[in-house]
Image (tube, helix red, strand yellow):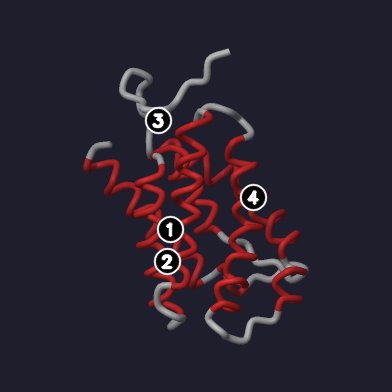
Amino acid sequence: MSVLDGVKAAVILFVAAIVQVSILTQIHVLDGVPDLLLVTLVAVALLRGAVVGAVGGFFAGLIVDTATFGQLGLTSLMLTVAGYWIGRYGETTGRDRAHAPYLSVAVVTALYAVGLLLVHFVLGERAPALPVLSGIVPAVVLNLLLTAPVYALVRRLLRPPSRELSTEVRLLG
């Protein structure tokens, strides 16, 4: 990955984090909140791999934590794990599969919500489970609606690497 691609990914995730914190946290549809940052991270991680996904998730989470005066590192931890695993999925299954962004967004949205709930529980903080669990399905639907335009935009800005330079694993059979 070139330095220019790294800068583009950083700018994309920075803008997504700012829009998420300033605008989208105010939108509630049936207890669900659209998560533009998570969808954008999924797109970047699918296109650029596990390392870029993890680093991008960490810094985007740090932006969110500092902007919301939340517990520093909590969102960073969750987005780092999400970016890494989605990046690994993109590296091992192929980036050109049409269902990959949708499947990734659906799974990561649900696991992100449950993961945040579990981390709050482990830290001994008050985290009511009913609002979080009741908001998972609407959040998944809202994030799936964001997936197509966000993935198309990120794919246009971060051109997929050429096949000769790709390190993705190809399964035989």
For the residue marked with disc 2, what is the amino acid?
Ser
The answer to which of marks 3 and 4 sits earlier in the sequence is 4
According to the image, label 3 marks what residue? 160
Mark number for residue 76?
Answer: 2
Q: In what element is the residue under mark 3?
A: loop
**For residue 119, which quarter of the picture?**
bottom right
As measured in the structure, the alpha-carbon distance from the residue carrying label 3 to the one carrying label 4 is 23 Å
How many other residues sit within 10 Å of disc 1, few (<14), some (14-19) or many (≥20)?
many
| Farthest top residue in view | 173
According to the image, label 1 marks what residue? 80
Nearer mark to the viewer, of 2 and 3: 2
As measured in the structure, the alpha-carbon distance from the residue carrying label 3 to the one carrying label 1 is 22 Å
As measured in the structure, the alpha-carbon distance from the residue carrying label 4 to the one carrying label 1 is 15 Å
Q: Residue at x 57, y 44 (%)?
A: 149
The answer to which of marks 3 and 1 sits earlier in the sequence is 1
- Assess whether mark 4 and mark 3 are in contact (beta carbons under 8 angstroms): no
- Assess whether mark 2 and mark 1 are in contact (beta carbons under 8 angstroms): yes
- Assess whether mark 4 and mark 2 are in contact (beta carbons under 8 angstroms): no
Give the percent coordinates (x, y) of residue 60. 40, 62
Give the percent coordinates (x, y) of residue 165. 31, 23
- Residue sitting nearer the eye, 82 or 44: 82
- Assess whether mark 3 and mark 2 are in contact (beta carbons under 8 angstroms): no
- Residue sitting nearer the eye, 29 or 138: 138
Locate the C terminus by quadrant.
top right
As measured in the structure, the alpha-carbon distance from the residue carrying label 2 to the one carrying label 3 is 26 Å
According to the image, label 4 marks what residue? 107
Give the percent coordinates (x, y) of residue 11. 33, 54
For the residue marked with disc 3, what is the amino acid?
Pro
